[in-house]
Image (tube, rainbow, N blue to C red):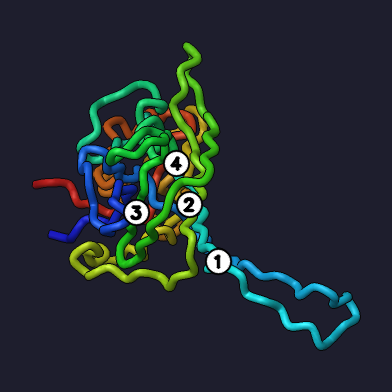
């Protein structure tokens, strides 16, 4: 039986010890991000007395610099929910678990409120830092005005320049046969009034719509919800 697709996780950590804590706060993403953007910045200072035309001035390095990570995450209650998540009809029940990582509180005896340190781990990629900013966009609503889908833009930072951490392969299960690596697979939105058999037939190489429905957890493939996200590259044969 093929191994499950590796999913990115947000994990609370003790930054000083670099150990994972409070496993009940761990968030497993619903859809893997399409990309991870890492940027580096050095703290430099132009020497006094040097002008823009002075070629002899030496730039001074005055700090350790910073490393930042930007990532976009999506959550959708009309799709199969992350493992271990209670059923919910409001996407904010899912995004509130992410918002925890930017919420200040007094921790470990600190006198001031600070946000928790967080580790983003995805396969062999790992980044430790704190959430500098979070932007949530509600993108799909029910007829009653209940938010069903949201995208979250997260910016994490750490006060040093560091190389990518590579995690032991135990945290990165092999990809299922015939499936690309995380983040390379495009999710398609179902148009209003569409059904999976016709959508699969219109996509070259999509293959058996029954196995696509089974892999995506679609209960009624002949009546898709408008905007429902579908991975047409996923395959899971029906149990015989």
Spatial separation of the CA atoms under disc 3 and disc 2:
9 Å
For disc 1, the marked residue is 65
Spatial separation of the CA atoms under disc 2 and disc 4:
17 Å
Spatial separation of the CA atoms under disc 3 and disc 4:
18 Å
For disc 4, the marked residue is 74
Tell me which numbered mark, 1 or 3, is placed earlier along the sequence: 1
Foreground residue, 239 or 156?
A: 156
The structure residue drawn at horizontal position 27% and vertical position 39%, both measured from the top left corner, is 25
**Front: mark 1 or 3:** 1
Q: Secondary structure at mark 4?
A: strand
Tell me which numbered mark, 3 or 4, is placed earlier along the sequence: 4
92 up-or-down from 159: above or below:
above
- Determine whether, in the image, residue 41 is placed left or right of residue 112: right
Q: Secondary structure at mark 3?
A: strand
Q: Position of residue 97 (x, y in %)?
A: 35, 34
Where residue 175 sits, quadrant-wise, is bottom left
Rate crowding at label 1 as few (under 14), some (14 to 19) or many (20 or more) other CA atoms within 10 Å: some
For disc 3, the marked residue is 119
135 up-or-down from 178: above or below:
above
The residue sitting at the right extreme is 53
Foreground residue, 27 or 130?
A: 130
């Amino acid at each position: 039986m093929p191994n499950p697709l590796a999913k990115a996780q947000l994990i609370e950590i003790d930054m000083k010890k670099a150990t994972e804590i409070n496993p009940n706060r761990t968030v497993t993403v619903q859809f893997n991000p399409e990309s991870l953007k890492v940027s580096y910045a050095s703290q430099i200072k132009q020497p006094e007395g040097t002008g823009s035309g002075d070629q002899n001035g030496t730039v001074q390095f005055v700090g350790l610099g910073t490393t930042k990570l930007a990532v976009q995450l999506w959550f959708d209650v009309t799709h199969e929910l992350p493992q271990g998540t209670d059923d919910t009809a409001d996407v904010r029940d899912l995004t509130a678990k992410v918002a925890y990582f930017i919420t200040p509180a007094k921790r470990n005896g600190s006198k001031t409120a600070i946000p928790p340190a967080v580790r983003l781990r995805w396969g062999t990629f790992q980044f430790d830092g704190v959430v500098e900013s979070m932007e949530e966009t509600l993108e799909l609503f029910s007829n009653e005005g209940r938010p069903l889908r949201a995208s979250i833009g997260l910016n994490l930072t750490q006060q040093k320049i560091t190389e990518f951490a590579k995690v032991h392969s135990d945290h990165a299960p092999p990809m299922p046969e015939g499936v690309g690596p995380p983040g390379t697979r495009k999710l398609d939105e179902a148009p209003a009034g569409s059904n999976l058999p016709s959508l699969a037939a219109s996509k070259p190489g999509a293959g058996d719509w029954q196995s696509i429905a089974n892999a995506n957890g679609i209960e009624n493939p002949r009546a898709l919800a408008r905007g429902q996200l579908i991975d047409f590259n996923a395959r899971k044969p029906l149990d015989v």
